[in-house]
Every structure is written in C-alpha cells, then in structure tokens.
Amino acid sequence: MKPFLLLLCHVAVAMAVPGCHSDRDRYHRPRENCTAGSFTDIPAGLEPTTQVLLFPQNQFSSLSWSSYQVFTEIYEIDLTGNKVSEVTPSEAAVLPSLRVLQLGSNQLTSLPAGGFSACPDLIELHLHNNAISSLSDDSFTSLSKLEILDLSSNHITVLPALMLRPLSAIEALYIESNKIKVMPDDWFSPKEEVPYLFLSANPWACSCSLGYLRKYLDDYDYNVYTRDRLIISPDAESVVCDSPPRLKGTPVVSLEESDFCSTDAGPTGDVMTTAEPTGHGCHSDRDKDHRPRENCTAGNFTDIPAGLEPTTQVLLFPQNQFSSLSWSSYQVFTEIYEIDLTGNKVSEVTPSEAAVLPSLRVLRLGSNQLTSLPAGGFSTCPDLIELHLHNNAISSLSDDSFTSLSKLEILDLSSNHITVLPALMLRPLSAIETLCIERNKIKVMPDDWFSPKKEVPYLFLSANPWACSCSLGYLRTYLDEYDYNVYTRDSLIITSDAESVVCDSPPRLKGTPVVSLEESDFCSTDAGPRGDVMTTAEPATTATNTTTTTASPSTTAPKATTVKACSTKICTWLRRKQLKHQ
C-alpha cells in the first residue's frame, strides 16, 4: 500500500469546472472545451495556463478583453454562436499572445476603429455569419500580422477604401455572401496579391465603376475561390454581375469594358434599366453551379416570406429567427436543392409521413438549438447528400435517426453533447464519405460500428473523452487499419492525424494517442473492469494531471498536412501554414 499512497501524493487534481472538458488541441496546447454550457462569462476555476478556450454556443453578450488576461499564454478564443453584439476597443494590448479569435455567428452589426487593438498579433479573425453592415478604414488597424480574415455572410454594402492597408500579411480574405456592389479602385494596394480570395454571392454592379475589379480578376484569377465545407475550388467565374439586368449572372472576368461601360450607357453603365429591389428583404442571385438562389441572411425572418420564386433551388436563411423546421413550407419550391438555416433557433426536427422534398440534397441546421434527433427525422428528404448539424446541443441519437438516407455522403455532428453512439446508427448510411463527430462527449465506439461500410474516407473523431479500457478494442483496431482516413480540421487546414484520437481516461493514459496503444496497455490482465490498473477515471468535467504517469505531449509529433480535393497551390500553401504555426 505504501507505494500506492506515495503515488497519490504526486497526483494534482485541478478544480472541477462543470460544463467544461480539459484536453489538448492538435498542437498539444492546453485546452478547455466549454461548448454549449449556458455560460455568460468565463467561469472561475479554469487553469491560468490554458492556451485554447472554446465557448461556442453559450450566452456571452459581450467581449470583455480583461476577462481573459488571467490566461497569460492564451492562443485561441472561440465564442462562435453566442450573443456578442459589440467589440470595444482597448487602450492597451492586453492579450499580446492571442493568435486566433472566433466570433462567427454572433450579433455584431459594426466594427469600430481599433476594435481589435487588444490583440495586435492576431493571425486569424473569424467574423462570419454576423449582421455587420458598417466598417471603417481603421476597423483592423494594428493587425499587421493578420493572415486570415473572414467577413462572409454579413450585411456589408460598402468596402472602405483603405480598410486593407494595415493588413500587410493577409493571405486569405472572405467577403462572400454580403451586399457589396462596388470594389474601390486600388483596394488591394499595397499588397496586390492575396492568395485566397472569396468574393462570390455579392450583388456586383457591372457599371463603369467595375473597371478595377474586372482588371484585378484578369490579373489574379488563379487566387479567386469558392468553398463548400471541405471543398475549396478555384473559380474566378463565381464573381458575377447582379445588375444591370442584361448582365445578371454573367461572370465579371468574361466582360470587356464595352460590355459594362458603353458610350451609350447612363451613369451606371446600364443601357437598359436598373435592377429592382426584391421587396422581401432577400437578394436573388445564383450559386457557383448557377442554381437560382435567394439569400435572406440575417433578415429577422421567422418563416419563409411570401413572394419568393417557386423556381428557387437554393434558400439561404442563416442568422434569422426560425424556431421550427416546417417541411411543408418548402413544398412550393419543387426543385429545391439546398436549405440553409444555420444560426437560427430550431429546437426540433419532426418526422414526415411522406418524402415531400425529394429534390433536397443539402440541409444546413448548424448552430441551432436541437437536443435530439427522432427516428426517421429526415424521411421527408431521402435523397440528401449533405446534412450539417454541428454546434447544436444534441445529446440523444437512435439507431434510426438517419434511416432512409442511403445517399448521404456528408454528416456533420461535431460540437454537440453526444455521449453514446447507437450501435446501428450508421447502417442506413451506405454512401457516407465524410463523418464529423469531433468535439462531443463520446467515450466508447460500439463494436463493428462502421459495418457494413468499413472505410469512410474522411473521419473526424478528435476532442472526445475516449475511455481507454477493455471496450477500446474495436476503435484501436479500426484506427490501425484506417489511420490514413482520420483527420482534424482548423479553418482552411485539414490535417491527416490519427494521433488526434487520444485517451481521456484512465489518468495514467490521459493524452496518449489510441493508435499507439497495445492491448496490454488498456486491457491488462491485472486491470479492473474498465482496464485501468490504478484507479477509475475522474468525471470528464475534472481535469486531472499526474507528475509521474502522464505521457509527455512533446513525444508525439504532428503529422504532415494532407488536403484532399484541392489544387497544388492550395496544398502547398496550407502545408506551409501548418509548419509555420506549430
């Protein structure tokens, strides 16, 4: 007994923070995951050495820089899907170590001058899916090291002429899905070439003011992309005219000056008539595959408004006030291909007795308020190819949650509260290609879970509290056979990393990659029923550190970046960025 007692003396148990889970990110930075815990501020008890704070889907209403000063090495803050309505400038650089700030899907409407002066060394700033309509030349002043800026899916109408001047290091700029009509002359000066530009889904006015954008696209067409979840595609032709009517849908890069600035044209370059407003708060255009689309982002809609064209194939309603998913509301759109209700308040999915939306292929329900998925919940759209359910509060699934979805290729259940994987849940999904279940509360994978489709090309399993006990056998064998299919993702970077799946318990194995274990490590003949030869694991809400038994994170080297479905240029750049930030 004496050696055992001596070992316990060296065990340091951190203060339990209910609703949070301690682990490490893929670069082994200490991380607290407090997703969907109803927090309104930073809770007491978090370790000051924490470098990554994840608080998506909580109730934060403001961004108080001083609240984070206790974390002296803070690298990333994620407040995605909260209720933050403003960013307040700081008089000092109180967070000099902060590199990544995630503020997507909040309630921001403007960005004041110097709003991010608290963190001058930011590398990534994510502001997508807000309601930002107002920017200034100084919104991003002092951010000379910023490489990634995401302003997509906002209400931006005007690009300030000097806004990009401070951003001398910018590498990826997202301004797609806004209301921008004109790009100011010399907007990209002094850094003309930005390797990754996302400009689509804006109502570009193809008038005499188009000259700079048209020439820029001609010079740097290879830098213009579109994105669809995991797929990034070069597509300069995604930047299309919205007006005048005679040019609507025409790729800007294909125009000659005489097309948009005729000597016979009026001051706007339109020889016919100006485009009429839609009248219902939505913007009509086409997606990258030229499907008719209605973009009704952040319009305070609670249901589908009257007046939309029945021929519409893509309906975008992110950041609205939908509280339910009424399948019958969409029946009028007989060719509907995609419905996006990201960032609404949908709390349940009701099964339908009939397949009322047979043409629907993509359904986006991320960042809503779902807590469970009933049997046959998606029977109304049996031909779905993509189903996005990330950032909800789903804790309950069943074997029949996805029944009838035999054509589904992409299923995203990341960042939920899932604790149990139903043994037969994947059986209907015979076409599944991408499965995202990272950032949940899953401890065990049922035996033969991937049967009958053994190989899933893209698997995201990290940031779960895997229990490395005798029940681990199937997951361990699977990872050994299909390690090349296991990935992690971080913004644009998709990394092949089977070692991202790590033990959370027992304490002696915490942080150890599952794929590195032998059966004797987790299911010893001397072990108890859970395979722990020492003590049973603490609850997931308690971070436990030992000075004698925890494997050193530094012994595990990150794997090389592998990006599928991308151009040579993208792969090269992303690999370079990963090495840079290690």
Image (tube, rainbow, N blue to C red):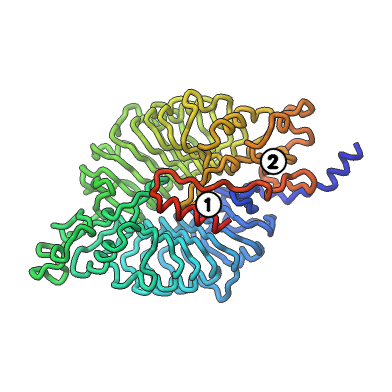
> Mark 1: few, some, or many residues within 10 Å (few <14, many ≥20)?
many
- Viewer-proximal residue, 363 or 51? 51
SS category of the residue bearing label 1: loop
Count of marks placed on residues: 2
- Viewer-proximal residue, 398 or 218? 218
47 sits left or right of 132 in the view:
right
72 sits left or right of 136 in the view:
right
Residue that label 2 marks: 539
Q: Earlier in the sequence, mark 1 or mark 2?
A: 1
Task: Residue at 29% x, 32% y: name it.
Answer: 358
SS category of the residue bearing label 2: loop
Q: Is residue 415 visible?
A: no
- Viewer-proximal residue, 459 or 335? 459
Image spot of residue 340 (x, y percent): 36, 46
Residue that label 1 marks: 56
Task: Residue at 21% x, 46% y: name it.
Answer: 309
Image spot of residue 86 (x, y percent): 47, 65
| Residue kind at label 1, given as amino acid type | Pro
Q: Residue furthest left?
A: 264
Hey, which quadrant is residue 218 in on the image? Answer: bottom left
Image height of 154 relative to 232, above or below: below
